[in-house]
Amino acid sequence: MPVIDELLRANQEYARDFDRGHLPLPPARRLAILTCMDARILPSRAFGLEEGDAHVIRNAGGRARDALRSLIISQRLLGTVEVAVIHHTDCGMLTFNNRDLREKVSTDLGQDTGEFDFLPFQDLDASVREDVEFLMATQLLDPATLIRGFVYDVRDGRLREVPIETPAPAP
């Protein structure tokens, strides 16, 4: 049986007792979480969330450039005021570079990705800092947004905050 058919069965069971259809559209905690699509991370369990609490935006590596569209919508239309950027240990994004993945796509599919940036990284803390700084610098999010960065350890389930150097205000 295809796994998607298993999802359909599980959904029928879930829907049988579903009682959350009354929740409002904006997230109750006014929080957006940007994290990786890694299957070992279940944000609701790992971060103590219930349905309706937060927007959870996921992509490969939890990269901010890839998620900016969703964050703008989350903030401008649905009222989020805080963003948690959460990367994780043992991330697949640490295992390749653009050139290698471009070659793999070419070999496997016969397709040219051009200069497509898959946004890999070699240093976990540096990638968190880069994403937090990118979001803090964009003019497309409210400058008052609280943005913090973390690393989630897939081995022990703990979050560790990554310190971000903020420039001193101009005199």
Image: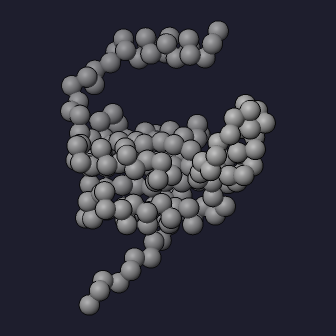
Residue 153 lies, in percent from the top left, at 59, 53
Total marks in image: 0
Q: Residue at x 33, y 43 (%)?
A: 54
Q: Residue at x 29, y 86 (%)?
A: 170
Q: Classify residue 18 as left or right of residue 165.
A: left
Near-viewer residue (19 or 65): 65
Residue 151 lies, in percent from the top left, at 54, 58
Q: Residue at x 68, y 40 (%)?
A: 112
Residue 171 lies, in percent from the top left, at 26, 90
Q: Classify residue 75 as left or right of residue 90.
A: left
Which residue in the rendered view is the most extreme toward the bottom? 171
Q: Classify residue 15 as left or right of residue 28.
A: right
Query: In which quadrant is the N terminus drawn?
Result: top right
Q: Is residue 155 above or below residue 164?
A: above
Do we see residue 78 in this rendering?
Answer: yes
Quarter of the rendering containing residue 5: top right
Residue 2 lies, in percent from the top left, at 63, 13
Q: Is residue 16 above or below residue 48?
A: above
Near-viewer residue (35 or 96): 96
Colour scheme of this structure image? one colour
Near-viewer residue (86 or 117): 117
Do we see residue 118 in this rendering?
Answer: no
Q: Residue at x 37, y 15 (%)?
A: 15
